Amino acid sequence: MKIMVLSTLYPPNLLGGAEKSVALIARGLAARGHQVSVLTLHDDPTHTETMEDGVSVLRYPLRNLYWPFPAEDGRGKAAKLAFHLIDSLNLLMAGAVKDAIRRHKPDIVLSNQLSGFSVLPWRIIHKAGIPILHSFRDFYLLCARSKMFRQGRQCQVRCADCRVLAYPRKQLSRHVDGVTGVSQYMIERHLAYGLFGNALILPPILSAVNTPPQASARVLAQPDAVRHFGYIGRVEREKGIDALLDGLLTIPPARWKLTIAGIGPEAYVTHLRARCAGLPVDFLGFVPETQFYGGVDVVAVPSIWEEPLPRSVLEAFGHGLTVIASSRGGIPEVVRPGATGYLVDMDRPQEMAAAIARVVEHPLEGRTFGENGRRLVLARTKETVAADYEAASLQVIEHVNRRAAVRSNQKEGVLF
């Protein structure tokens, strides 16, 4: 098949785990013999097309007021509003998609993150007669900020500006032929808002993981008295790093060490550095994942927003590491208490403290959970996940053909 993958960012442009997951899907599909192209954005005024790992990568400049990645910090309210209004139905980016479709003529488009493109490309692709399979990786279709998180708390209902900006996204979702996601939570959350009335609803597809041939050397070594905790990802308030620190401070500092890997808004990183002064906390900045996972015993994913399903959980599993994670979003679908890790209700600080105390006092229990998690993700290679997307694509194409046949027969007056 000729498969086009639509994604806001693509390596080496990395904002979070979604870009890694999309790249593994594209490369896996190419390895399975498909002709794969990726349509993505970059912070450059020119359009480029390169062949990378068997994938044709088409990078288009973002046609909007500014480049918003990784964040919009420092932008005025008027500039942000103007950006998001353009991003609701971006005619210039739709033109870029139309050009890519004309030149590459895909059999199906795998739609992923759409911030920057807007949802208008769905209409372009649909009018070209090409099936669309969309995968949920963020809340862009429901929220201008793509997170359903504002002023330090999760949005229980959508604010007025998000309802207005998301209205076209709901309307144009009728052009999508199939949907899946990284978690069942994400699928159900979007369907609850009435999107994708014409789509075939498929089961979630767990992301691919580059699992090392054996568990981390630290896991295989004898546990020591000091437990090395780690956080990797965007260093932002909604990631719950302060809550993790609160829990760690209930244990004597001689018993633990914390490594924070990643980047984020300067103001929040400065706050964390000030708070951690004099504590056994290291800030690594952006580092390769293997460097991080090889140096910790426990990976914490203390999100206070409802994450779709962070890659850090799956990558920690791949290294056989103990996981302490928030019970929000899609995380509980893989982190199972007493089996693959420790789940924490982020509204109950005592649960974080109890989980930390447990892994400090009972390291072998956490190691067992890490081994179970590793078995869970061993089969999630890029080839396996690509096969899942291949099967899902064929189901969507069949769904589209069957629907077209029904319409044709109805026009001809054929009754079944």
Image (spheres, rainbow, N blue to C red):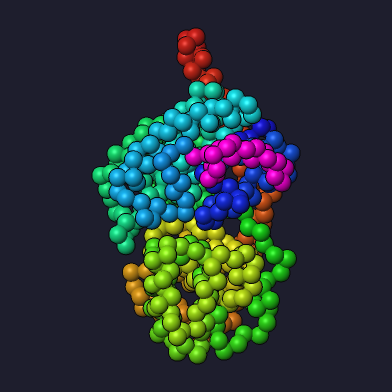
Q: Kindly tell me whether residue 202 is visible in this rendering.
A: no
Q: Identify the magenta region.
A: 41-62
- Decide if residue 154 is on the left or right side of residue 179: left
Residue 49, magenta (yes or no): yes
> Quick one: 116 or 175, which is closer to the camera?
116
Residue extending furthest toward the top: 412
Q: How many marks?
A: 0
Q: Residue at x 59, y 36 (%)?
A: 47
Q: Residue at x 32, y 62 (%)?
A: 152
Q: Main secondary structure of the magenta part?
A: strand
Q: Residue at x 62, y 85 (%)?
A: 223
Residue 295 placement (x, y as % from top left): 62, 76
Q: In terms of image quadrants, where is residue 130? A: top right
Q: Considering only vertical position in the picture, is 289 above or below 259? A: above
Q: Residue at x 43, y 82 (%)?
A: 277
Residue extending furthest toward the left: 160
Q: The N terminus lies in which quarter of the figure?
A: top right
- Decide if residue 378 is on the left or right side of residue 168: right
Q: Considering only vertical position in the picture, is 117 above or below 346? A: above
Q: Kindly tell me whether residue 355 is visible in this rendering.
A: yes
Residue 87 placement (x, y as % from top left): 40, 38
> Quick one: 19 or 361, which is closer to the camera?
19
> Quick one: 76 or 238, which is closer to the camera?
76
> Quick one: 33 or 380, which is closer to the camera?
33
- Decide if residue 358 is on the left or right side of residue 315: left
Q: In terms of image quadrants, where is residue 98? A: top right
Residue 404 placement (x, y as % from top left): 52, 21
Residue 248, magenta (yes or no): no
Residue 357 placement (x, y as % from top left): 46, 83
Q: Considering only vertical position in the picture, is 28 above or below 91? A: below
